[in-house]
Each structure stands twice: as C-alpha cells, then as structure tokens.
C-alpha cells in the first residue's frame, strides 16, 4: 500500500538510526522512486507481452499464461520450463501481462496478497480467451498454494477451460513436464476439433 508504506518503513528504519538521522521525507522520496520503477517495469513487461500475443495470434499459435511466484522466474528454480514451453511453438507470457485487463471481482477465498490477486485476475481473463491457456508453477513446500490452485482451477474449470499445474519441487528432469505439456496441447487440439465439428453440425 504505497500511501502507508513510507510511514511504516520510516518507523522500522528509525530503530537503526537512533539519532534521528533518517527523515520521513527521505523514506517518502525513496519509496516514490521505487514504486515508479516498479510501474515502469510492469509497463515494459506488458508491452513485451502484448507483442508476443500479437505475434502468436498472427501465426495462429496457442498462448500460454505461465503463472508462478516471483521467485519462480529464477532459472535454477523453474528448470527452464518457460523455454521448454516455447519449444512447442507457442507464445508464453506471465500473469503480469494480463492481470490488469479485468476489473475487480469476488473470489471464494481471502484475497490479501498482490501475487494471488494477479494470479486470479489472469485466470479470469484467460477463461474468456479461446487461444490462451494457463499453466501454474507451484512449489510443493508452499502450503498456501493449495488454496490458490483450488481457486484458479475453479475459475477456469467452471467455464469449461483447462487447468494445468506443475509442481517444480518434484522435478528431477523435464521428461515428466514434457508429457504434462503434450497432454495439455493434445487436449486443446481435441477440444478445438470437437468445437469445429459441433459448429459444422449447426451450420
């Protein structure tokens, strides 16, 4: 909460500067610069993501919203799953790219973390995009993921959409992930064929 953060952080930092050598105005200026850089970062991410979406749609490619916790961006943690997905000839974007495209909406769980809010918003947006599908990376050791995954699954499956979860802490090699992704793409293709067949019957 940008309007509350400077005062709280100043109080914390004052414990390390007992002589009052750090002013609230300094913390406010630093926080303002930090939030501005965060906004600029998200703008760059969304601009690049929009380019990927446009390119994928121009080529008739599937788009994967790859959602994960912020630390999942580390290649040592995600095992290069993002690159593996692109090797299937699909576009890959993060939940940050699309999480601002929906208005606030109610969820069935206590929604008090910004990451969870972005995740739910991305799922809500993807459910209405036939060429987009969500893949969620979870760490098996994070108990709260049991809550987020249930809510994301519900948001998607209630609309007849597919949900794919990859537990990265259980990965020893990418073979199992490849099988999971192939199953996803096969299900997407089968569903597309069924939709086409249904459309032709009604024509």
Image (cartoon, rainbow, N blue to C red):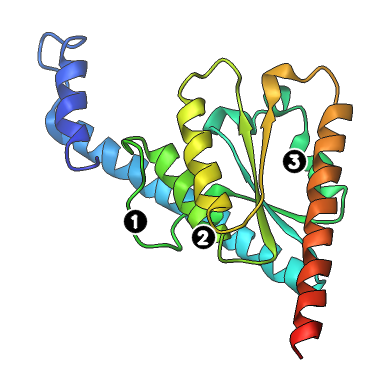
Marks 2 and 3: in contact by CB < 8 Å?
no
**Which of the 4 image quarters holds residue 129?**
bottom right
Q: Is residue 11 left or right of residue 49?
A: left
Task: Work out whether residue 142 or residue 100 is closer to the camera in this orientation and state it.
Answer: 142
Q: Crowding at label 3, few (<14), some or many (≥20) Cα neighbours within 10 Å?
A: some
Q: For mark 3, what is the residue?
A: 82
Q: Foreground mark, 1 or 3?
A: 1
Per the rendering, the mark at residue 125 is 2
In the rendered view, would you say 35 is above or below 9? below
Residue 103 % position (x, y) = 36, 62
Mark 2–mark 1 Cα distance, whole angstroms, equals 11 Å
Residue at 61% across / 57% down in the picture?
Answer: 160
Mark 3–mark 2 Cα distance, whole angstroms, equals 20 Å
Q: Crowding at label 1, few (<14), some or many (≥20) Cα neighbours within 10 Å?
A: few
Per the rendering, the mark at residue 191 is none
Residue at 66% across / 60% down in the picture?
Answer: 132
Q: For mark 1, what is the residue?
A: 105
């Amino acid at each position: 909460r940008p309007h509350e953060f400077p005062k709280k952080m100043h109080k914390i930092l004052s414990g390390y500067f007992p002589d009052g050598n750090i002013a609230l105005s300094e913390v406010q200026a630093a926080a303002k610069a930090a939030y501005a850089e965060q906004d600029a970062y998200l703008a760059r991410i969304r601009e690049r993501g929009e380019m990927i979406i446009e390119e994928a749609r121009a080529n008739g490619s599937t788009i994967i919203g790859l959602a994960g916790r912020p630390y999942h961006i580390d290649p040592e943690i995600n095992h290069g799953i993002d690159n593996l997905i692109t090797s299937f000839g699909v576009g890959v974007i993060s939940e940050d790219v699309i999480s601002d495209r929906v208005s606030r909406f109610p969820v069935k769980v206590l929604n008090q973390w910004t990451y969870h809010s972005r995740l739910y918003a991305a799922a809500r947006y993807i459910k209405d995009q036939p060429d987009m599908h969500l893949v969620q990376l979870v760490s098996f050791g994070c108990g709260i993921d049991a809550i987020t995954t249930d809510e994301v699954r519900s948001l998607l499956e209630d609309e007849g959409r597919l949900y794919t979860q990859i537990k990265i802490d259980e990965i020893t090699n990418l073979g199992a992930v490849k099988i999971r992704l192939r199953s996803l793409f096969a299900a997407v293709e089968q569903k597309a064929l069924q939709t086409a067949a249904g459309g032709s019957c009604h024509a």
